[in-house]
């Protein structure tokens, strides 16, 4: 690959079109068509097409619906439907049902998934609780055959393997990772192998290679064997759910084959650019989708890196293969690190090492999965394959957990600044193109230094910026706990009542661009107010824990001892005893605090937290504003 590729019309068209989408993103991401009435609303008659394979959720199934009618009148919008049963309906079917409509919830905590925003980006503006589903029109025969193949494969995995193994096989073969247990998902993420649970280019390539080989063995010419391979691969992509990585890979293979048939240059870079442009032409919203971004960044790193560095990686023997696998892992993940920090706030440090083992193993898992899916009728052969798959999957999952359990296998990453992301991508481009820039030429090192300088601009500008003139309080919680994250007068972060999921709390801190809490505050000594503290402490630094007087539960005492050992200060407070920017008081009937019936309020600069952390006042006596927490949502108060 040469730099001239970046001057070709197709790439320039993609760059200009993507820039246009970004500049006019408010129009591209405009909210979906609204409903002709307010929400909530009960008993609405809805008709529409099931737009995705339904996913299992507690109490039933969930799926996106493209509506065609509402109360019998034409209306095109999107709904996220929850139903106890689909009555045999699935992807591609047109259905009708009665539904209770409601607005989707927002983020449950700062930095966590904003469900309403996520749905709006997909063109979905409301949720529907459906009942009495009826089939209006079945999907076309191709879709019905594809989904029958999908469900047959998942059923084969379920009958042959443990639930954990079946879920992983579903992810590796079909990209259906929603059944993977949360702790195992975390292990895949910490080991840097989460991408193996997403059906992608390797899956499409596997199908194309197998079908092409079989077609050639049966005597078909190369042209017809290639067309047969693409036809079967397209059917597989449909069965796997048309996810962005699969569509990208399929379009790349299609572009490459078309160029070959037309006797034109079949470059991987041109195929990647063609795939991106086609997807964005039909779905401009995809530019802002994490799956689209990660898929194309990984494919871009592989395409450019292997092309530029290929001559330097051609060494023989086992060491050469190991170096090749290491390079593939590095190129595929190089451009993903900022995206992982922005979306997931977690970076794996062992990914380069783990993928040398796990990527080849996933190819074997894919082969076993396809064999299991193809032989449920084969009696003893299916049982033999099931036994082999069970043994293999136990070893595969064990390897994932081994790498995830290594010391410092991963770390929490604060959300990077725009300067840091820009500098990182500049440095990544320099590394990918280093052979083209010339190892002995000053421009290589000048470009690398420029990338490092841009990366440093964010932290330097933040360090030189004056202390913020205002404060902000974010109130959130679940059905049991009310929490608050407060920005102090000097910019430090304070967290009240860490009683929700610890990783969610850590994401709230990391989303603010920091990895340190000045203090954790407890309004009472009840377990509901500190249950997430242990997990939180393993993800971010806690400088101090401030809590009221009263008998401390044994579990809390052990946790506080652990935090002391990690350098955190643990202090009890009496009313009026200030600690820097923090002071407290009691709201209770008795003059002394008992740790149960009475409650403590906290003041952090101009922010006063009370009512168990669920109420905040900002300013003198609340004159500048006040807010009441909404369970399961985030309420922000700021501006002093």
Image: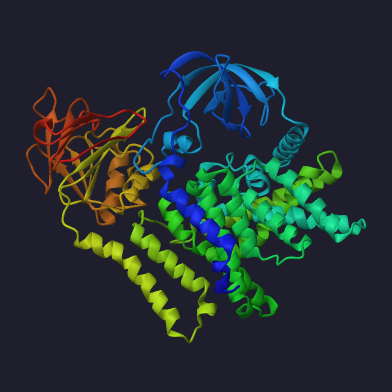
The location of residue 220, given as percent across then percent down, is 90, 56
Residue found at the far top of this picture: 43
The location of residue 491, given as percent across then percent down, is 20, 51
The colouring scheme, among rainbow, by chain, secondary structure or one colour, is rainbow
Residue 39, compared with residue 513, is above or below; it is above
Q: Quadrant of the N terminus?
A: bottom right
Q: Quadrant of the C terminus?
A: top left
Total marks shown come to: 0
Residue 518, compared with residue 457, is above or below; it is above
Residue found at the far right of this picture: 219
Which residue is at a point 66% across and 44% down the rendered structure image?
170
Which residue is at a point 76% across and 55% down the rendered structure image?
208
Residue 353 in view, yes or no: no
The image quarter containing residue 57 is top right
Q: Say left or right for 209 vs 554.
A: right
The location of residue 461, given as percent across then percent down, is 24, 62
User: Looking at the image, which is closer to me, 42 or 6?
Assistant: 6
Residue 637 in view, yes or no: yes
The image quarter containing residue 13 is bottom right
């Amino acid at each position: 690959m040469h730099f001239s590729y970046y001057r070709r019309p197709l790439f320039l068209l993609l760059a200009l079109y993507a820039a246009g989408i970004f500049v006019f993103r408010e129009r591209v991401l405009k909210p979906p068509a609204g409903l002709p009435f307010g929400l909530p609303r009960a008993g609405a008659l809805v008709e529409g097409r099931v737009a995705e394979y339904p996913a299992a959720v507690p109490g039933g199934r969930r799926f996106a619906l493209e509506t065609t009618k509402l109360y019998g009148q034409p209306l095109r919008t999107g709904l996220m439907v929850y139903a106890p049963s689909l009555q045999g309906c699935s992807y591609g079917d047109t259905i009708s049902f009665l539904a209770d409509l409601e607005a989707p919830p927002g983020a449950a905590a700062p930095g966590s998934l904003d469900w309403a925003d996520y749905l709006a980006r997909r063109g979905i503006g409301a949720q529907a609780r459906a009942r009495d589903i009826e089939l209006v029109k079945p999907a076309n025969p191709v879709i019905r055959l594809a989904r029958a193949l999908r469900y047959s494969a998942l059923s084969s995995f379920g009958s042959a393997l443990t639930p954990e193994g079946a879920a992983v096989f579903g992810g590796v073969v079909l990209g259906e990772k929603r059944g993977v247990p949360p702790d195992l998902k975390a292990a895949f993420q910490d080991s840097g192998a989460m991408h193996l649970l997403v059906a992608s280019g390797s899956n499409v390539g596997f199908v194309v290679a197998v079908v092409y080989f079989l077609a050639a063995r049966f005597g078909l010419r190369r042209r017809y064997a290639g067309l047969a391979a693409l036809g079967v691969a397209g059917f597989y992509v449909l069965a796997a759910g048309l996810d962005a990585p699969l569509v990208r890979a399929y379009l790349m293979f299609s572009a490459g084959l078309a160029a070959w048939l037309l006797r034109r240059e079949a470059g991987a870079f041109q195929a990647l650019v063609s795939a991106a442009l086609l997807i964005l032409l039909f779905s401009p919203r995809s530019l802002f989708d994490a799956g689209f971004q990660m898929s194309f960044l990984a494919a871009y790193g592989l395409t450019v890196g292997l092309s530029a560095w290929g001559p330097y990686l051609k060494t023989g023997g086992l060491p050469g293969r190991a170096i090749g696998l290491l390079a593939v892992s590095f190129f595929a993940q190089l451009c993903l690190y900022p995206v992982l920090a922005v979306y997931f706030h977690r970076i794996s440090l062992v990914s380069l090492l783990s993928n040398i083992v796990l990527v080849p193993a996933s190819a074997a898992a894919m082969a076993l999965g396809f064999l299991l899916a193809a032989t449920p009728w084969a009696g003893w052969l299916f049982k033999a394959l099931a036994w082999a798959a069970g043994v293999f999957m136990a070893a595969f999952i064990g390897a994932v957990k081994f790498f995830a359990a290594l010391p410092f296998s991963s770390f929490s990453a604060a959300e990077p600044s725009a300067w840091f992301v820009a500098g990182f991508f500049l440095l990544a481009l320099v590394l990918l193109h280093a052979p083209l820039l010339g190892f002995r030429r000053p421009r290589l090192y000048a470009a690398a230094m420029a990338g490092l300088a841009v990366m440093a601009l964010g932290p330097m500008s933040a360090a030189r910026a004056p202390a913020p003139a205002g404060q902000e309080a974010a109130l959130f919680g679940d059905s049991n706990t009310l929490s608050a994250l407060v920005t102090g007068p000097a910019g430090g972060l304070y967290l009240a009542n860490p009683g929700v999921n610890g990783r969610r709390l850590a994401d709230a801190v990391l989303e603010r661009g920091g990895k340190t809490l000045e203090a954790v505050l407890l309004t009472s000594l009840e377990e509901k107010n500190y249950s997430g503290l242990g997990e939180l402490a393993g993800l971010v630094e806690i400088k101090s824990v401030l809590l009221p007087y009263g008998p401390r539960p044994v579990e809390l005492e052990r946790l506080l001892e652990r935090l002391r050992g990690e350098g955190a200060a643990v202090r009890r407070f009496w009313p009026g005893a200030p600690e820097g920017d923090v002071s407290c008081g009691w709201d209770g009937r008795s003059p002394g605090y008992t740790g149960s019936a009475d409650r403590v309020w906290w003041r952090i600069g101009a922010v006063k937290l009370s009512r168990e952390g669920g109420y905040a006042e900002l300013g003198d006596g609340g004159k500048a504003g006040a807010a009441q927490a909404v369970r399961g949502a985030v309420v922000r108060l700021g501006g002093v």
